[in-house]
Image (spheres, helix red, strand yellow):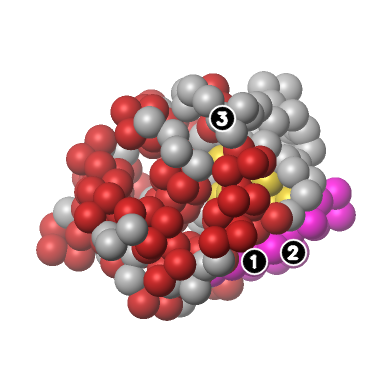
Amino acid sequence: MNDAPDRLANLRDVAELVDGISAGVLLRSDAPHVGDEDPDSVVWPPSTVVDTRAPGEASAEHPWAEVCDVRAISVLPDANIAIADGTLAAMYSGFLEGAAAMRVVEVVSTVATAPAPVLIHCSAGKDRTGVSVAVALSLAGAERAHIVADYVATGPNMPGVLARFMRTMSAHMHANGGVAGSELPRELIEAPAYAIEAVLDRLEEHDGGAEGWFIANGGRLETVELLRARLRA
C-alpha cells in the first residue's frame, strides 16, 4: 500500500500511560522498516533494541543495527502465531510456559540490565511485545489498570501497523497464498483488555506472584531488583 506510513505505527514510551514508571527507559513498538523516519515522540535512538521476532520474520539485517545494540530474542520458534482455543488469552498463556517463558524472562532481564533506553518490538508490537512489557511492569509493581491501559493503546494503531505490513509483504507470501491482513482472525488485529488481563491473572496466581513466576522460569532475584530500580520513577 503506497500510503503506508514511513514511520513506526505503534511506538510509545510505556511511561506515557503507566504511572510511577521512569520516562526514557522502556519503549515499545512495531517492527522497523528500512527508510523509516526517526520519531520525535520519544527519546531517540534507543541504546538497546530487543527484537522478539522469529528469524523468518526478518529477512535482512535489522534496520537499526548500526545505531543500536540489537539483541534477537525469539519468543516463539517460528513466525506461525496462531490463536489457540480461539482466544488471545489462551495464546498469551502459552507465552508464560516452557521455552517461550524462558525467552520472555530473557527479554525482561535485558530491560533490567542492558543500556537504556531499551526498546522491545515484535512485528506489530502487540502480542510478544505486549506480554513481555506486561511482565516487566508487573515485576516493577505497576498498577494493573495502567498495565492494561498501555496494552489496549495498541488497538487504535493497528490499521497503521497493517498498512506497513501489507506494503512490505513479500512476493513469496503473495505467490503462496499468504494471509492478508483482512483475513487474519479478528483478535489478532485487536488488543482487547481481557487478553492481557489473563496474563496478569496467571502471574498473580503463581506461587510468589510475578516474581515467583520469573524466578521459576530462569530469572534471578537480583535481576528483579535491578529492574525495579531502573523502571520505578
Asked whether 141 falls inside the magenta stretch, the response is no
Helix, strand or loop status at disc 2: loop
Gap between marks 2 and 1 measured at Cα: 11 Å
**Type of amino acid under label 3:** Ile
Quarter of the rendering occupied by the C terminus: top right
| Residue 68 belongs to magenta span | yes
Relative to 138, say whether 101 is above or below: below
Q: Is residue 151 above or below residue 67?
A: above
Give the answer, above or below, for where 102 lies relative to 93: below
Depth check: 156 or 128 in front? 128
Distance, label 1 to label 3, CA atoms, is: 25 Å
Of callouts 3 and 2, the N-terminal one: 3
Residue range of the region highlighted in magenta in the rendering = 57-76
Residue beneath disc 1: 72
Question: Sequence order check: which comes first, mark 2 or mark 1?
Answer: 2
Which residue is identified by label 3?
A: 21
Where residue 166 appears, as percent x and y from the top left, is 47, 47
